[in-house]
Image (tube, helix red, strand yellow):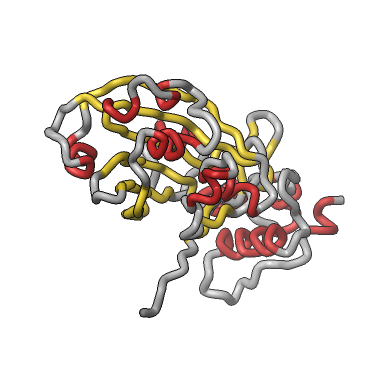
Amino acid sequence: MVGHEVLVQQVDPASDRAVFRQIADHLRDAIQDGRLRTGEKLPSEAQLMEHYHVARMTIRQAIQELKTEGLAVSEHGRGVFVRSRPNVKRLASDRFARRHRKEGKAAFLAESETVGAKASVDRIEVREVPAPDDIAERLRVPPGEVVVSRSRRYSMDGTPVEVATSYIPVELARGTRIMDDNPGPGGIYARIEERGRQLERFVEDVSTRMPTREEARLLLLGPGIPVFRLVRTAYDLEGRAVEVCDTIMSGDAYQLSYELPAH
């Protein structure tokens, strides 16, 4: 019986913490200590009402707390389940190292392998577009100048974790596999270097916010789950910007981890 395994606590009527928050605390504890595992169904509203001797609305407020935190998700006609969470993908400072490209691996593949996850990409769209103002500024081209845009969605073990759009000057992309859905071994950076523009450094700007409706749809995000926005500019040996990548990443799928020199 689910109640026997999970419902092992009672609310404290003397506590100044609202009853629904106490119930949410109990269920959160059950998720975090493994009594409720990923994909398992939470006790029903009827079970929770019987155990805690509270009204249905109090139970629904408690469940909503877990949904807002991204811990639970409703499935129409089936109930509420512990939300599946992807393996945390560590964004390390060496993920764009040349050795990965020499091995034929793009950055996402190299990073996914470090957590033992299977990487995949879909919703790929390659087209020529006017550069948005902020992208044009980073690429150091006039606003509205035509650039090549590569949009795609990345998943780990079948769970979407990020959507990214790269912007590349047309003189570097036209006539290369950058214009194809699959840019080939090593990804677009390998193709750029094949054009004689050896990469020297990357600059990343990271911010956090709540997702737009479309971002939440593409990344299957529940209420309360934020996203990272990471905008990366790639520079060649002469200091010229050769690509800007605008990436939106699920906040519960990533940990930012950088090694910084102390000299």
Q: Residue at x 57, y 59 (%)?
A: 20
Between 231 and 239, the one nearer to me in the picture = 239
Q: State which quadrant residue 166 falls in.
A: top left
Q: Residue at x 66, y 67 (%)?
A: 11
Between 131 and 227, the one nearer to me in the picture = 131
Q: Quadrant of the C terminus?
A: bottom left
Q: Is residue 23 above or below residue 156?
A: below
Q: Is residue 43 visible?
A: yes
Q: Is residue 217 above or below residue 224?
A: above
* Image x and y of residue 47, in percent: 75, 49
Q: Residue at x 42, y 39 (%)?
A: 189
Between 106 and 218, the one nearer to me in the picture = 106
* Image x and y of residue 204, in percent: 34, 54
Q: In the figure, is residue 49 to the left or right of 71?
A: right
Q: Residue at x 19, y 37 (%)?
A: 136
* Image x and y of residue 114, in percent: 64, 54
Residue found farthest to the right:
1
Q: Is residue 165 visible?
A: no
Q: In the figure, is residue 96 to the left or right of 233?
A: right
Q: Is residue 94 above or below residue 222?
A: below
Residue found farthest to the front:
196
* Image x and y of residue 40, in percent: 75, 45
Residue found farthest to the left:
142
Residue found farthest to the bottom:
263
Between 94 and 69, the one nearer to me in the picture = 94
How many discs appear?
0
Q: In the figure, is residue 5 to the left or right of 68?
A: right
Q: In the figure, is residue 165 to the left or right of 242?
A: right
Q: Is residue 217 above or below residue 211?
A: above
